[in-house]
Image: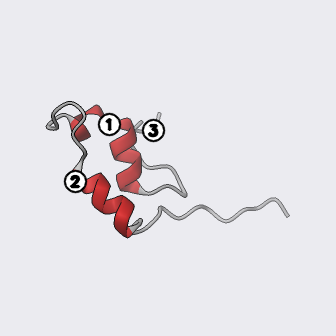
C-alpha cells in the first residue's frame, strides 16, 4: 500500500500535504492563516508531480 501522504500524479506536493496532513497546520492558532499557504496562493504552484502518459489510444 502506498504512503497516504505521497503526492498523487498531477498534484502540487505542498497543496496535497497541507490539505491531508494535520501536522502541517498544527502550529497555527485557531483561524490563523498559514503563511506558506498564503504565499503559495499568491505566487502559484512551484511544480506539479508529473502524470504518467496516457495509454488509452
Q: Does 7 sit above or below residue 39?
A: above
In the image, is 2 to the left or to the right of 21?
A: right
- Residues under labels 2 and 1: Cα distance? 16 Å
Between 33 and 13, the one lying in front of the other is 33
Between 23 and 40, the one lying in front of the other is 40
Tell me the residue at 76%/61% (across/down): 55
Q: Does 40 sit above or below residue 22?
A: below
* Residue located beneath label 2 in the image: 35
Q: Position of residue 56 (x, y in %)?
A: 81, 59
Q: Earlier in the sequence, mark 1 or mark 3?
A: 3
Between 1 and 7, the one lying in front of the other is 7
- Residues under labels 3 and 2: Cα distance? 29 Å
Tell me the residue at 25%/55% (across/down): 36
Q: Secondary structure at mark 3?
A: loop
In the image, is 33 to the left or to the right of 52?
A: left
- Residues at badges 1 and 3 in contact (C-beta under 8 Å)? no
Q: Quadrant of the C terminus?
A: bottom right
* Residue located beneath label 1 in the image: 21
Label 1 packing within 10 angstroms: few (<14), some (14-19), many (20+): few
Residue that lies at the very extreme toward the right in this rendered image: 57
Tell me the residue at 61%/62% (across/down): 52
Label 3 packing within 10 angstroms: few (<14), some (14-19), many (20+): few
Q: Secondary structure at mark 1?
A: loop
* Residue located beneath label 3 in the image: 2
Q: Does 5 sit above or below residue 54?
A: above
Amino acid at each position: 500500500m502506498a504512503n497516504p501522504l505521497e503526492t498523487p500524479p498531477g498534484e502540487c506536493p505542498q497543496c496535497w500535504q497541507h490539505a491531508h496532513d494535520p501536522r502541517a497546520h498544527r502550529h497555527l492558532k485557531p483561524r490563523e492563516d498559514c503563511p506558506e499557504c498564503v504565499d503559495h496562493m499568491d505566487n502559484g504552484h512551484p511544480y506539479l508531480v508529473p502524470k504518467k502518459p496516457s495509454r488509452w489510444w
